[in-house]
């Protein structure tokens, strides 16, 4: 011990030019963590918040009690959706770089979270996503062209030109509107789940935020209310190691995993390999079954890595090693599921390439169609008088006046 | 009809709507078993059960945030924030979420939350139990802001607020929960039974949001005010002996500008009074509204009487509170201009 107090400033294990170092990550061998029954007492499974639930081993085989034993067809579906997510992001990123949309955020490296969880949840379960859940929107059937039109803020934009690109919503698919402020969706998910229980329905809610946003007050409100009322909700912490330029230590991840955040409130936490499709699926199903049968909330920490920049507005080579992702011990979720399927004889490089080609074509077609509804520079354009709609259910007198004033100046 | 104070009228409004609509739920600190620190929800948990009148953790941000989620799932939540002074931890959820969900989702989602919260001073509450933060909320597009000044309006406006598909912040001036107050703490307390607006129908009725009320008709001066100061302004006008038209704004946002304009055009003089601090207070908006519409009808500068721009001091409550004397001085100033 030192002879006086000291201020600890967390430092990441490596900065640009240094060798990536993930020795701080505690890993468990695939298949080594026991899977408890859903009626277990929280205090008896505290190990789940510090161990790492993994199914896929280094030889791409599925191991242990958490193996969900999914049909190969289902795994192929999962891989296809992850691929679509990956190349949709790549294409929209390029489109932003060409100046055709103002902003973009990709989910690179985190696709398993949205796709595996999307598949493990039921259609009636309500999702409260963050901005790196594009896969959820895809999996739940949002049309590519609708997502592109949102990014273009054009005449077919679901948000009527009011939101930054990628802050989608899909009411019919039970996905709430992404805020853009961090963590605010967490208490909404808990309240939605409470209402579900009040009404005696068996739909559950799920929400997502990053390691960084766990520092927000809303995170703490949400887990407190979830614990107090035993709300049927899955609270996901997607620990992708980086919050723009600050590593997860700045959200308090240095001494205790994020999955353990709920332990003090009696909420079970599962620390899962977020790049392991099978493990994510299985942990989600466990938490969902538990919530549906009155067992209350579960916190799932997905240990993953933000494969790309935070957004199109930052350059990650300025704050972390260029090759850090390649050194990440949990790899790439798309590659791992692909190799698992190939190893098991249910997928091939040819099939993989065929799907990629098919999706690239589909995305190109969708982009062509999206542009017909307007681009940032070419019409058709949204009617600016619509900016006054939906502030209230009905247009109040002062907004009618302001609309008139605006239109007079525009004409 | 029944004689009710403002607490009973608010409780009656909640009771009537909870009977009518099973989706109405209440959540807040101490609202359930105990019935609220001001007793507004007394007996409601016994009648409607613990799933509809829910005691909450002491976390205003959590109360408002989860109420929004409930509203998204088809409920019609009434969140009680125990004192308006405690609302700030939930402010981000009001500004960034509640007020904008309909807008940002292109009209696809909305959450019809009503936030009830006692405001104002004159109860020896010191700086953390006396604030009037209404102007902070009227500045937000997408929410409505209501402040009743009597039991009849409180019930009718509360019913409209809860039934509204827009979010509403409903401020309850706690000094007048038990009776109208003329601004002079030396005078004996007066019960609502002595006031015509203490007569409240037992059943369902509503008062539309966005309509001001002319409390007293007059020809020489328009006094625009709301909440506790409606009663203080009446007493002050009587003290001065001016034939004042007194307008209770009732809904601050959206504002009924027509009633204000017509009155000032008639009287040619205007005084605006509120208990909240003066600088950037809601009075500034009222002055502008009147000035823009009535400039050529004005015979004197518009006068503003408000709380001083300090925190609400415990020991100097009555020097701080814009009471009868201060409003009377303001009235004389407006009337002196020839």
Image (cartoon, grey):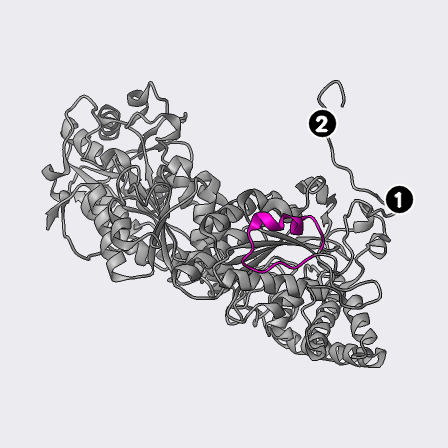
Q: Is residue B56 left or right of residue A254?
A: left
Which residue matches tag 2?
A: A7
> Where is A102 relative to A269, above or below?
below
Q: What chain is tagged by disc 2?
A: A
- Taking the spot 33% from the left edge, 52% from the top edge, the residue there is B50
Q: Is residue A341 left or right of residue A35?
A: right
Query: Which element is circle 2 on?
Result: loop
- Taking the spot 23% from the left edge, 23% from the top edge, the residue there is B325
Q: Is residue B156 left or right of residue A267?
A: left
Q: What percent of the width, then of the height, locates residue A163?
A: 57, 59
Which sits in the foreground, A403 or B228? B228
Q: Which mark is residue A149?
A: none
| Quarter that holds the N terminus of chain A | top right
Q: What chain is tagged by disc 1?
A: A
Q: Is residue A70 magenta?
A: no
Q: Categorize mark 1 by other alpha carbons within 10 Å: few (<14), some (14-19), many (20+).
A: few
Q: What percent of the width, then of the height, locates residue B263?
A: 22, 45
- Residue A360 occupies quadrant: bottom right
Which sits in the foreground, A30 or B140? A30
Q: CA distance from mark 1 to mark 2?
A: 24 Å
Labels 1 and 2 positioned on one and the same chain: yes
For the question of whether residue B208 can be seen, the reply is yes
Q: What percent of the width, then of the height, locates residue A349?
A: 85, 78
Q: Categorize mark 2 by other alpha carbons within 10 Å: few (<14), some (14-19), many (20+).
A: few
Query: Which element is circle 1 on?
Result: loop
Which sits in the foreground, A206 or A217? A206
Which residue matches tag 1?
A: A18
Give the residues in magenta.
Answer: A34-52
Q: Is residue A47 magenta?
A: yes
């Amino acid at each position: 011990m030192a002879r006086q107090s000291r201020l600890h400033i967390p430092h990441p294990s490596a900065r640009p030019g240094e060798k990536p170092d993930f020795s701080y990550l505690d890993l468990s061998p695939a298949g080594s963590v026991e899977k408890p029954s859903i009626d277990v007492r929280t205090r008896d499974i505290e190990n789940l918040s510090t161990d790492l639930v993994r199914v896929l081993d280094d030889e791409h085989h599925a191991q242990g009690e958490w193996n969900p034993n999914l049909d190969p067809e289902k795994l192929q579906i999962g891989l296809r959706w992850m691929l679509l997510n990956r190349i949709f992001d790549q294409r929209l990123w390029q489109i932003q770089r060409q100046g055709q949309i103002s902003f973009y955020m990709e989910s690179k490296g985190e696709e398993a979270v949205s796709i595996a969880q999307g598949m493990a949840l039921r259609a009636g379960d309500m999702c409260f996503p963050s901005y790196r859940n594009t896969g959820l929107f895809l999996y739940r059937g949002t049309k590519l062209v609708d997502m592109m039109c949102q990014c273009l803020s054009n005449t077919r934009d679901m948000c009527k030109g009011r939101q930054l690109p990628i802050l989608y919503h899909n009411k019919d698919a039970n996905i709430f509107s992404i805020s853009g402020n961090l963590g605010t969706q967490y208490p909404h998910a808990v309240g939605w789940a409470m209402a579900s229980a009040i009404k005696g329905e068996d739909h559950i809610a799920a929400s997502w935020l990053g390691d960084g946003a766990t520092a927000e007050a809303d995170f703490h409100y949400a887990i407190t209310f979830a614990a107090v009322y035993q709300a049927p909700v899955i609270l996901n912490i997607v620990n992708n190691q980086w919050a723009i330029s600050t590593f997860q230590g700045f959200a308090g991840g240095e001494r205790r995993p994020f999955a353990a955040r709920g332990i003090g409130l009696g909420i079970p936490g599962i620390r899962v390999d977020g790049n392991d499709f099978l493990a994510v699926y299985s942990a989600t199903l466990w938490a969902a079954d538990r919530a549906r049968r009155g067992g209350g909330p579960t916190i799932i920490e997905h240990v993953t890595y933000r494969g790309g920049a935070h957004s199109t507005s930052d350059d990650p080579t300025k704050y972390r090693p260029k090759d850090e992702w390649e050194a990440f011990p949990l790899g790439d979720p798309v590659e791992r599921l692909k190799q698992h399927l190939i190893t098991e004889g249910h997928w091939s490089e040819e099939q993989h390439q065929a799907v990629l080609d098919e999706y690239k074509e589909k995305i190109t077609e969708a982009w062509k169609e999206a542009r017909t509804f307007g681009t940032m520079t070419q019409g058709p354009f949204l009617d600016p008088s619509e900016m006054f709609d939906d502030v209230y259910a009905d247009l109040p007198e002062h907004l009618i006046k302001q609309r008139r004033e605006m239109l007079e100046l525009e004409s | 009809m029944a004689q009710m104070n403002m607490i009973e009228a608010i409780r009656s409004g909640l009771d009537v709507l909870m009977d009518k609509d099973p989706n109405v739920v209440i959540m807040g600190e101490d609202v359930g078993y105990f019935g609220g620190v001001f007793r507004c929800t007394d007996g409601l948990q016994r009648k409607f059960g613990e799933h509809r009148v829910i005691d909450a953790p002491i976390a205003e941000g959590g109360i408002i945030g989860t109420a929004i989620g409930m509203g998204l799932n088809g409920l019609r939540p009434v969140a009680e924030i125990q004192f308006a002074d405690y609302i700030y931890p939930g402010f981000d959820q009001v500004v960034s979420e509640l007020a904008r969900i309909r807008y940002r989702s292109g009209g696809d989602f909305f959450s019809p939350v009503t936030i009830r919260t006692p405001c104002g001073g004159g109860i020896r509450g010191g700086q953390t139990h006396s604030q009037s933060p209404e102007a902070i909320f009227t500045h937000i597009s997408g929410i409505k802001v209501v402040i009743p000044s009597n039991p009849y309006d409180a019930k009718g406006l509360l019913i409209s607020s809860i039934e509204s598909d827009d979010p509403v912040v409903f401020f309850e001036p706690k000094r007048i929960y038990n009776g109208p107050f003329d601004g002079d703490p030396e005078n004996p307390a007066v019960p609502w039974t002595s006031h015509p607006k203490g007569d409240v129908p037992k059943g369902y009725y509503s008062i539309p949001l966005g309509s001001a009320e002319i409390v007293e008709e007059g020809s020489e001066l328009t006094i625009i005010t709301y909440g506790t100061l409606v009663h203080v302004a009446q007493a002050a006008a009587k003290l001065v002996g001016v034939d004042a038209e007194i307008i209770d704004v009732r809904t601050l946002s959206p504002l009924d500008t027509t009633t204000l304009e017509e009155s000032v055009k008639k009287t040619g003089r205007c005084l605006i009074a509120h208990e909240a601090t003066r600088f950037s207070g809601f009075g500034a908006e009222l002055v502008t509204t009147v000035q823009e519409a009535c400039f050529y009808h004005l015979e004197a500068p518009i006068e503003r009487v408000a709380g001083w721009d300090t925190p609400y001091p415990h020991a100097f409550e009555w020097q701080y509170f814009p009471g009868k004397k201060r409003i009377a001085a303001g009235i004389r100033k407006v009337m002196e201009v020839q």
